[in-house]
């Protein structure tokens, strides 16, 4: 069933969106998820907050944990300056296959590297495998019980620098209480909450922006 849903999503993107136009891909996915079938994209409301944080940071090197169908990947990549790079990790091979096609339709392949696998396996290999020293911006949107351990892992691997911005989805729904407690109480982070709603619903959710202080 999941594969059928993905085919329907891709068909909607191909039907409604213009190839090479990221904004039309974003709108097509939002329309499909609002009117046809709900999906766990960050969505248009939280997506606007994501846009404003990405524009403010204007990052050269971005890590996204949780590609899903590529919606937030396209949202972020369309705002990046020339030469900037986005590495996005996806554990589920079916999601990754869909995301590659969504990213291609948006015409953003040159800025994006989609890697299949688990964050705990790939975070320690960012330096030697991708030549990344540190990230400027990290979007956390994967398994909610991995936000905290992976943040600590990124710290330990030296992937965060003074000023690196972490933006975490779903801090209310499904919720990431251990992560929130950590970034809000740690002296190494300056954290703030952007109240919003769970994608395409009226339920409360929000994004937590945390600046690493080094
Ligand atoms: O579960 C969510 N996302 C994670 C999906 C799996 C990620 C797997 N994965 C990807 C990269 C990766 C790297 N390493 C390890 C694992 C990795 C999620 C759920 C909801 C939601 C669902 C039902 C409901 F009733 C309310 C809310 C809403 C969201 O916005 C979400 O993001
Ligand atoms: Mg999410």
Image (spheres, rainbow, N blue to C red):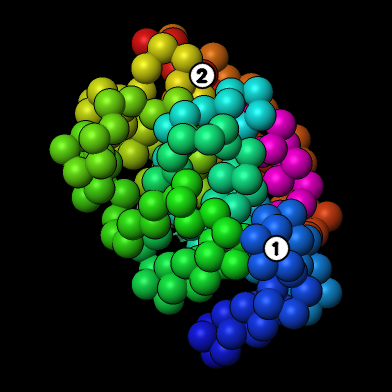
The image position of residue 208, as x and y in percent, is 60, 32
Q: Which residues are magenta?
A: 43-53
Question: What main secondary structure does the magenta stretch of the protein show?
Answer: helix
In this view, 134 is above or below 179: above
Q: Earlier in the sequence, mark 2 or mark 1?
A: 1
**Residue on which disc 1 sits:** 25
Depth check: 4 or 130 in front? 130
The image position of residue 22, as x and y in percent, is 68, 56
Quarter that holds the N terminus = bottom right
The image position of residue 99, as x and y in percent, is 50, 66
Q: Residue at x 60, y 53 (%)?
A: 74
Q: Residue at x 22, y 50 (%)?
A: 121
Depth check: 91 or 127 in front? 127
In this view, 94 is above or below 201: below
**Residue on which disc 2 sits:** 211
Say which element carries label 2: strand
The image position of residue 88, as x and y in percent, is 42, 50
Gap in Å between the C-alphas at discs 2 and 1? 30 Å
Left/right placement of residue 125 relative to residue 30 reads left
Q: Is residue 204 visible?
A: no
Q: Please tell me in which quadrant of the rendered image residue 202 appears.
A: bottom right
Q: Residue at x 57, y 80 (%)?
A: 6
Q: Residue at x 65, y 23 (%)?
A: 56
The label shown at residue 123 is none
User: CB of residue at label 2: within 8 Å of ligand 2?
Assistant: no
Say which element carries label 1: helix
Quarter that holds the C terminus = top left
Indicate yes or no whether the magenta region holds residue 108: no
Depth check: 5 or 110 in front? 110
Indicate yes or no whether the magenta region holds residue 47: yes
């Amino acid at each position: 069933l999941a594969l059928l849903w993905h085919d329907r999503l891709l068909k909607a993107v191909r039907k409604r969106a213009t190839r090479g136009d990221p904004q039309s891909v974003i709108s097509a996915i939002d329309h499909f998820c609002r009117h046809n079938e709900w999906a766990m994209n960050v969505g248009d409301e939280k997506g606007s907050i994501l846009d404003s944080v990405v524009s403010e940071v204007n990052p050269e090197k971005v890590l996204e944990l949780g590609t899903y169908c590529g919606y937030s990947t396209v949202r972020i990549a369309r705002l990046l300056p020339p030469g900037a790079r986005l590495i996005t990790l996806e554990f589920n091979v079916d999601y990754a296959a869909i995301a590659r096609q969504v990213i291609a339709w948006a015409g953003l392949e040159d800025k994006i590297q989609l890697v299949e696998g688990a964050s705990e396996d790939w975070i320690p290999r960012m330096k030697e495998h991708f030549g990344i020293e540190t990230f400027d911006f990290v979007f956390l949107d994967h398994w909610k019980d991995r936000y905290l351990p992976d943040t600590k892992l990124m710290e330990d691997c030296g992937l965060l620098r003074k000023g690196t911005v972490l933006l975490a989805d779903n801090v209310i729904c499904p919720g990431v209480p251990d992560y929130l407690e950590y970034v809000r109480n740690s002296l190494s982070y300056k954290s703030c909450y952007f109240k919003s709603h769970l994608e395409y619903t009226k339920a409360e959710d929000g994004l937590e922006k945390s600046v690493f202080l080094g």
